[in-house]
Image (tube, helix red, strand yellow):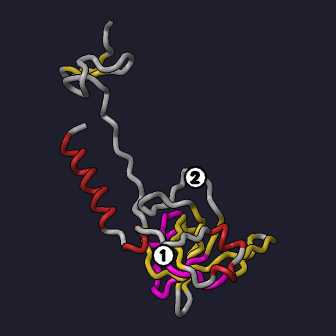
Amino acid sequence: MNIRVFLLLSASVLSACSTLPPAIKDPPAIDVSLAQASGDIARYKGAPVRWGGVIIDVQNEKTYSRLQVLSYPLNSYGRPNRDESHQGRFYLDSREFLDPAVYEKDKEITAAGVLTGDQELMIGNKPLRLPVLEATALHLWPDYEPVPNYYYGGFGPGGFYPYGYYGYPYYWGGYYGFPRY
């Protein structure tokens, strides 16, 4: 990998982490899970939480905006980890206007705030009680952009060994080839 590309990627990762609000970056002292809150909302009402997931729906009312979020566990940076199974749904209320063009469906979001109760949601004929999180801090995550992998192994063009690893093509003098052993 080109050293410039490596330095650029490193700088962007470090700068992305440093711009997170502290409430998003650091979990509360007592980290209440969505399952705990859903099981006994009266006990955890008013508790600080940090949850995240994928936006399912946006509704704007006169005095607040409400997001319906499909919850995922958070990684060490506070970003939803979509490789894990989802944990359920919750409502996220914000006193700010959340533009549906920005906070659109399938975007990843993390919020910190307090639990204010729960509210019923009908999905088809099935009623669900969803915890309501009143947000004090929001972070909308950028989409992942795949980085092309140019590493073939070996010294010289493409790595540490002149012929690459067995079976992988190597680049030499404008042509791709396979090592001859």
Residue plotted at (37% across, 16% down): 166
Which label is found at residue 112?
Answer: 1
Q: As drawn, is 91 to the left or to the right of 9?
A: right
x 72%, y 72%: residue? 39
Relative height, residue 74 to residue 4 (above, below): below
Residue extent of the magenta highlight? 91-118
- Sooner in the amino-acid sequence: mark 2 or mark 1: 2
Identify the residue position indicated by label 2 in the image: 84
Q: Amino acid at mark 2?
A: Glu
Q: Is residue 170 above or below residue 45?
A: above
Disc sitting over residue 128 in the figure: none
Of all residues, the one furthest to the right in this rendering is 125
Q: Which quadrant of the view contains residue 90?
A: bottom right
Quarter of the picture containing the N terminus is: top left
The answer to which of 122 and 176 lies nearer the viewer is 122
Please rate how many residues cluster around mark 1, counting C-alpha atoms within 10 Å: few if below 14, some from 14 to 19, many from 20. many
Q: Quadrant of residue 148?
A: top left
Q: Amino acid at mark 1?
A: Ala
Badge 2 density bin: few <14, some 14–19, many ≥20, Cα 10 Å: few
